Image (tube, rainbow, N blue to C red):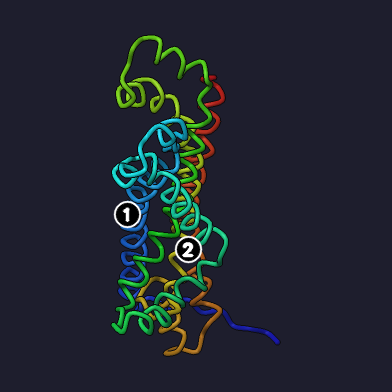
Amino acid sequence: MHYQWDFQFLLRYAPLFWKGVLVTLAYTAGTIFLGLILGLLIGLGRLARADRAVLSATPVKFWLVSPAFWAFPLQWCLIAFVEAFRCTPLLVQIVWVYYALPVLLGVQIPATVAAVMTLSCYTAAFYAEIFRGGIMSIERGQWDAARALGLRPWTMMRQVILPQAIRRMIPPFVNQSITQLKNTSLVSTIAVPDLLYNGTLITADTYRPLEVYTVVAVIYFVLLFPSTMLAQWYEKRLQTDR
């Protein structure tokens, strides 16, 4: 069958495409920001180790006020959070939060809230591992040298460890952020008016899915390709500096 391609009719739907692009970028930027904050807290929390020697030396009646006592359940809770979001499909998470969670809470969750909450927690789980892995990748000699200088833990982390770790975190952080832009397309399943959802509306109005979804794919490519090239350039620069 010979198909007659026609993109001209899409010009009248340009405002709808632009609106979808703006919503997609807004969700991407917002969830990356929230995920970054939450991921940093989770990553630092997972780095906190329970000191068994301190706990054993603490009287039982003072365990409830001992940080070492709470470090164990905190670690398990953070691990459960990270693995739950990393080991289940994002689409399943979005559908569960939007349709199943309101049943448990007895409160209707708007689609925008469900989308932001799920995307933020999902990317936070990956950012947490990036933070944790970047900090743990710093050689033990750097830690020992900082302690030998008499630096306090926070000062040591801020002046010695983090400057080195951040250089190693940036490439995976950029890659995960690029993935987050692609992940936002899944919120269309709960009627969030992103680029893909608006494309679906245009398709329902015109019955021309080939042209519509081709334009949607091209727009995603235009948004993502510069980011991937920037990530590759920075990775090569890091290798050269080393």
Crowd band around label 1 with a 10 angstrom C-alpha radius: few (<14), some (14–19), many (20+): some
Q: In which quarter of the image is the N terminus?
A: bottom right
Q: Mark 1 points at which residue?
A: 34
Please provide percent x and percent y for residue 170: 45, 37
Query: Would you place residue 32 above or below residue 69 in this image?
Result: below
Which x, y percent locates residue 231?
49, 40
Label 1 element class: helix
Q: Residue at x 33, y 77 (%)?
A: 111
Which image quadrant is residue 184 in? bottom left
Between 20 and 241, which is closer to the camera in this rendering? 241
Up-down relation of residue 189 to residue 18 (above or below):
below
Residue 226's x, y, as percent?
Answer: 46, 47
State the CA–CA distance, disc 1 to disc 2: 15 Å
Instruction: Write the residue at 53% across / 82% down.
Output: 209
Label whose residue precedes the other's in the sequence (1 or 2): 1
Residue type (three-letter) at the residue carrying disc 2? Asn
Q: Residue 183 carries which label?
A: 2
Single out the mark in the foreground, 1 or 2: 1
Which residue is at 52% across, 77% downward?
211
Three-letter code, disc 1:
Leu
Q: Is mark 2 on a helix, strand or loop?
A: helix
Instruction: Give the vertical position of 81 relative to 230 (above or below).
Output: below
Total marks in image: 2
Point 46% across, 85% down: residue: 203
- Residue 174: which disc? none
